[in-house]
Structures are given as structure tokens and as C-alpha cells.
Image (spheres, helix red, strand yellow):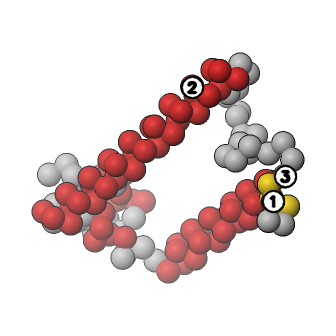
Amino acid sequence: FMVQENYPPLFSGAGGTSLQQISEIPVAAWFFITLSVGFSEVKRLQAGWEGWDLKEGYTPGDLGFDPLGLKPTDPVKLKEFEEIELNNGRLAMLASIGFIAQESTTGQTWGA
């Protein structure tokens, strides 16, 4: 929301709320987005699943991506880190709900 409304070169630059600008994203971009998400999901499924069962030793959400080495090795610290990450994700979802509610109710951007 913040990038889309304040940095229009990424989008059409037509102005207005993010909800209004989403419909102006070209079909080719939607096609690329759909393919990218689909590819990512297939890779994730292949990493953790065998048929209908989880692979042995696979922890859901752990795809082995930690280029900065931030993942704690201590199991207690890892559990705390995971809980913090989940809570931050939940807070971000609530914030996006707030953006959507504010824009759809007032018809103005979040910064107005």
C-alpha cells in the first residue's frame, strides 16, 4: 500500500487508492505473478511432502533459507524466534486490514 501509492513508477501512476490501482495492473503482470507464486508453491510442496504425508525430518515453514544466519541453533531460542516471527506476521495482516478498511470507507489514501 505505501509503495504503490507513493512510488507510481512501479504501477500506472494514475493516482488514487491502492484498491483503485490494483485493477490497472496489466494482464501480463498478473500472469507473471500467478506463475511466480505457482512455481514457489510447487517448490515448497516438493521440499516438504511425499504424497499426502510430510517428509521425515521436515518442519513446516523451514525451507532452509537463512542467508544471513539469523536462525538460532538453540531449540529454546528458535521457538522464541518463531513465535516473534508469527506475531509480526499477524500484526502485518491486521495493519493491511486497517489499510483496506480505511481506503474502502473514506476513498482516500492512507497518507491523506
102 horizontally vs 85: left or right: left
The image shows residue 101 at horizontal and vertical percentages of 23, 60
Q: Amino acid at mark 1?
A: Asp
Q: Is residue 53 left or right of residue 85?
A: right
Residue 79 in percent (x, y) is at 62, 28
Q: Residue at x 50, y 80 (%)?
A: 27
- Using the rendered view, name the quadrant where residue 45 is placed: bottom right
Residue type, label 2: Glu
Q: Secondary structure at mark 1?
A: strand
The image quadrant of residue 17 is bottom left
Q: CA distance from mark 2 to mark 1?
A: 27 Å
Name the mark nearer the viewer: 2 or 1: 1
> Which badge, 3 or 2, comes first in the chain's sequence?
3
Q: Secondary structure at mark 2?
A: helix
Q: Tell me, for residue 80, which label it has, or none.
A: 2
Q: Earlier in the sequence, mark 2 or mark 1?
A: 1
**Count of residue discs:** 3
Residue, x 14% and y 52% (percent of image)? 112
Q: Which residue is mark 1?
A: 53
Q: Residues within 10 Å of mark 2 (few under 14, many from 20)?
A: few
For disc 1, the neighbor class at 10 Å (few under 14, some 14 to 19, many from 20) is few
Query: Quadrant of the rendered structure where residue 70 is?
Result: top right
In terms of depth relative to the viewer, which is nearer, 67 or 86? 86
CB atoms at circles 1 and 3 under 8 Å apart?
Answer: yes
Identify the residue at horizontal 12%, vertical 62% (top origin).
Answer: 106
Q: CA distance from mark 3 to mark 2?
A: 24 Å
Kindly state the secondary structure of the residue where label 3 is placed: loop
Q: Above or below — where is 51 with respect to 47?
A: below
User: Circle 3 is placed at which residue position?
Assistant: 55
| Residue 94 visible in this rendered orientation of the protein | yes
Q: Nearer the viewer, residue 44 or 11?
A: 44
